[in-house]
Amino acid sequence: RKEVEQDPGPFNVPEGATVAFNCTYSNSASQSFFWYRQDCRKEPKLLMSVYSSGNEDGRFTAQLNRASQYISLLIRDSKLSDSATYLCVVEDNYGQNFVFGPGTRLSVLP
Amino acid sequence: GAVVSQHPSWVICKSGTSVKIECRSLDFQATTMFWYRQFPKQSLMLMATSNEGSKATYEQGVEKDKFLINHASLTLSTLTVTSAHPEDSSFYICSARVPPGQGSYEQYFGPGTRLTVT
């Protein structure tokens, strides 16, 4: 089993739609969790850290379920500019070991 | 968020030559930096973890004598691709980890270096 798994997509959604991504991880000792977005031919950029209590930043909501070992990202009112690949990242060794998921590609269509 | 710079942003070199890529944390001290490689339409692949003042830890399958990493200061890590070959052509991205005590272990990426070996 891969350490971090994501549905590769692509997810093609119309503008204004709500879309959700899930990510599962295998190491129950993982400590920190993140969502990054990566645009084509660019570096990944931190979208948000994911906290145990869940957190929201504008149209984006991230949740963590430690018992089931999955992380989710919800995007409301999708914009064309949200089109990107969303990477789930799990850290499990006090900042020494970051494991990236393969990414989920999102295309928001006009 | 924290700022990480990378230089050069792109380079074209001839087969057999060496290329050095610099990664700098501009507004924080990074005891740990990471080097990744990404081929077109593929995931990021971690090459090595670089800790300031010590030898880098390489991932399995990455030749340490070919990809030389030096992390001599808290704000600079360098990756040298020695005797480059066309199959080394890729997008090389560094990242720096925010130090403990400044939030969770977030890492910030440089803009990447696109290497083309002819």
Image (cartoon, coloured by chain):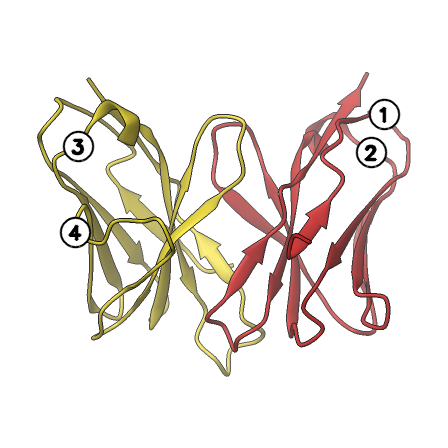
Chain colours: A red, B yellow
Q: CA distance from mark 4 to mark 2?
A: 46 Å
Front: mark 1 or 4: 4
Q: Chain of mark 3?
A: B
SS label for mark 1: loop
A9 lies left or right of B75: right
> What is the distance, in whole Å, between disc 2 and disc 3 at their CAs?
43 Å
In which quarter of the view is residue A12 placed? Answer: top right
Whether labels 1 and 4 belong to a single chain: the reply is no
Residue B29 vertical placement versus B19 (above, below): below
Q: Which residue is mark 2?
A: A78
Which amino acid, by three-letter code, is at mark 1? Glu
| Whether residue A88 is situated above or below residue A25 in the rendered picture | above
Q: Which residue is mark 3?
A: B84
The alpha-carbon separation of the residues under discs 2 and 1 comes to: 5 Å
Please check whether the numbered discs 3 and 1 fall on a single chain: no
Which residue is nearer to you in this view: B110 or B3?
A: B110
Q: Is residue B38 left or right of residue B19?
A: right
Q: In the rendered image, which residue does mark 1 sit on?
A: A15
